[in-house]
Image (cartoon, rainbow, N blue to C red):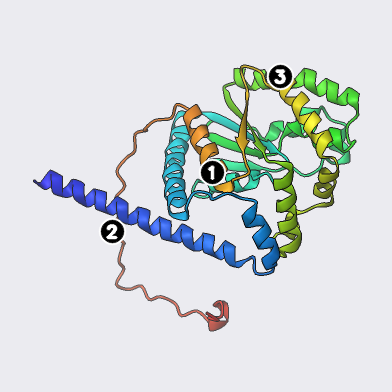
Amino acid sequence: MDDKTNGGGHESGVQDWLQAELEDTLDEDFELELSEPALSLELREIYKKAHPATIDRHTYFHELIRLQSELIRLQDWVEHSKEKIVVLFEGRDSAGKGGVIKRITQRLNPRICRVVALPAPSEREKTQWYFQRYVPHLPAGGEIVLFDRSWYNRAGVERVMGFADEDQVEQFFRDVPEFERMLLRSGVRLVKYWFSITDEEQQLRFLMRIHDPMKQWKLSPMDLQSRVRWERYTKAKEEMFARTNIPEAPWYIVEGNDKKRARLNCIDHLLSLIPYGPVPNEDVALPERVFNPNYERAVLPPELYVPRKY
């Protein structure tokens, strides 16, 4: 009887936690929606008409929280087993890479799971071995590293925009399979995702960014040039797949036109690739506070406090 009661209490507690987390996440999503008041009604209508009905919000957030709880289990397993995981996120500008990275890291320990988004190479880095500036960011045991764009810049933006000549691109294609095999032989688990969106979808997302002051920072001159060079990017992507989709480290394509489905599908797929499991955990008990009857808390001057405006 007691066991059933305790089990029921535990289940009820988990349900209460899930509900609280769901409400918190819904609040965050509502806040994001409120950040788009500058979008014209006309543009909103165009965007809505271009998208079929997606997953309803309640289902989406329940699934997202469930997957994020599994990511925490994965994190615990990685830390315990000293695994090394690298996940590459590639794709066209505005394809949704940043959105899924944010949902993966949202509830994880940044000391275990970190994001690497390197700027354009410096003049010194341009003279180095191409992979050299990526190597220091690779994980040690017990770490997960998510690359928001990666060494595949050479096969994509650098090639299309003319920052790398064809000899450098050819050298990259010859080197990258062996570089990735070296990582795998060293014990790194490597996963490569390409986020795929249509021409029309990218155009709509760029328009949303142009007309939304809260998102204009996401739109760089390089992004705008990528629209002009859509077909060149397509050809570059196709050759990249043909020459770097090795059996040991294959590419996985995430269909990204529907942002919510793309996030759930990517996280679910990532979890399916890694054989994580439960790890031993010691029971945590909150110790009693030490009470000193002679201690008096100092009164701090009011100017040290943040003003109570809200």
The amino acid sitting under disc 3 is Pro
Question: Could one spot residue 180 in this view of the protein?
Answer: yes
In front here: 231 or 294?
Answer: 231
In front here: 172 or 111?
Answer: 172
Residue 288: numbered disc: 2
Residue 212 falls in image quadrant: bottom right
Q: Position of residue 258 (x, y in %)?
A: 59, 45
Residue 283 falls in image quadrant: top left
In front here: 215 or 83?
Answer: 215
Residue identifier under label 3: 177
Query: Closer to the N terminus: mark 1 or mark 3?
Result: 3
> Looking at the image, which residue is at 65% across and 69% down?
37
Residue 85 falls in image quadrant: top right
Label 3–label 2 contact, CB within 8 A: no
Judged left or right of residue 46, residue 109 is: left
Residue identifier under label 1: 261
Q: Gap between marks 1 and 2, in whole Å?
A: 46 Å
Q: Gap between marks 3 and 2, in whole Å?
A: 56 Å
The amino acid sitting under disc 2 is Glu
**Residue, far front:** 49
Q: Gap between marks 1 and 3, in whole Å?
A: 30 Å
Callout 3: 10 Å neighbours few (<14), some, many (20+)?
some
> Looking at the image, which residue is at 61% across and 37% down?
255
